[in-house]
Amino acid sequence: MARGWESKAVEELRDEAPALATDQKRPVRTAEDIEKARKRGELELARKRVQADLTAATNPRHRELLERTLTDLDQRIQALDGKG
């Protein structure tokens, strides 16, 4: 009976080995990187929402406001990426 448990444990370790190897190859993300990714995600989500609103907008003033907002969001995303 002990032999059966031992072989199952070895089998589990063998199955987990590829997953552990890929985890070790993944670069470590700092808290700053995680925060930057979160902010970028929020900006991209806001951009999609403004883009959808712009597609449906008919009032010229509202469209102008949405276009300026879209430009601002693009600039913020570029600044976050370090391109601006």
Image (cartoon, grey):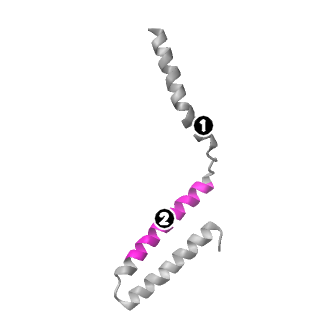
Give the left or right position of residue 19, taking residue 60 as reference: right
> Dot 2 lies on which element?
helix
The residue at 52%/74% (across/down) is: 73
Q: Is residue 39 above or below residue 22?
A: below
Dot 2 or dot 1: first in sequence order is 1
Residue 21: give its label.
1
Residue 77: give its label.
none
Which amino acid type corresponds to the residue marked 2 in the rendered image?
Glu
The residue at 63%/51% (across/down) is: 30
Residue 42: give its label.
2
**Region in magenta:** 32-52
Image quadrant holding the C terminus, namely bottom right
The residue at 44%/85% (across/down) is: 65
Q: Is residue 49 above or below residue 18?
A: below
* Residue 14 vs residue 69, the one in the foreground: 14
> Dot 1 lies on which element?
helix
Magenta run includes residue 36: yes
